[in-house]
Amino acid sequence: MTRLTVRIVFDGGDGFGPGKARLLELIGDGASLRKAASEMKMSYRHAWLLLQAAQMIFGAPLVETSVGGAHGGGSRLTALGRDVLRRYRTAERRAGAAAKGELAALTRLSVPMAGPTPARRKHGPRKKRSRSAATV
C-alpha cells in the first residue's frame, strides 16, 4: 500500500514526524514511556530523547509522569500533548487526501517488489588493499 508520511520542520530545523507522533500515541494508549519504547522496538533512552526533543519544540511538557504509588507509576499525555497529536494526525489525513490522485498515479508507475529495497552502501564496495614490500 502506498502511503504519504508527513514531517513538519519548524523554524530552526527541529522536526516532528511519524516517529514522535507514534511515540505520543503509544504513551497515550499504554500509559508508559517504557511500554511505548518497547512497542516501537527502541531503547528507553532513545524514546526519552525523542520525547525531550518534541517537548523542546513546543516549549512545554507533552507528557506527565507519576512515580509509584498505590496504582503504580506511568505517563499520560498533557492537554498540549493531546492537541499536538490531534493536529498532526489531522494534517496527515488532509495531506493524504489532497495527494490521493498523485499517490495512485505514482503507485501505477512503480515497479512491484517482493519487499523493501535493500539499503545502499554509503561508499560503494570495499576495495582490497594490496600489501607492498617495504623499500629499504
Image (cartoon, grey):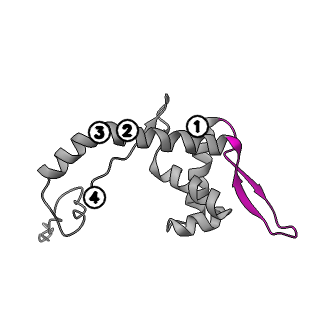
- Residue type pointed to by label 3: Ala
Q: Nearer the viewer, residue 129 or 30?
A: 30
Identify the magenta region.
Answer: 59-79
Amino acid type for the residue under numbered disc 4: Met
Q: Name which of mark 1 and mark 3 comes first in the sequence.
A: 1
Q: Earlier in the sequence, mark 3 or mark 4?
A: 4
Q: CA distance from mark 2 to mark 1?
A: 22 Å
Q: Which mark is residue 99?
A: 3
Residue at x-position 27% and y-position 54%: 2
Q: Residue at x 33, y 47 (%)?
A: 4
Residue placed under numbered mark 2 in the picture: 95
Image mark for residue 57 = 1
Q: Please report the residue visible at 70 percent of the width from the left and 55 percent of the height from the top.
A: 76
Would you call the spot at circle 4 few (<14 residues within 10 Å), some (14-19), or many (20 or more)? Answer: few
Q: Is residue 75 above or below residue 83?
A: below
Dot 2 lies on which element?
helix
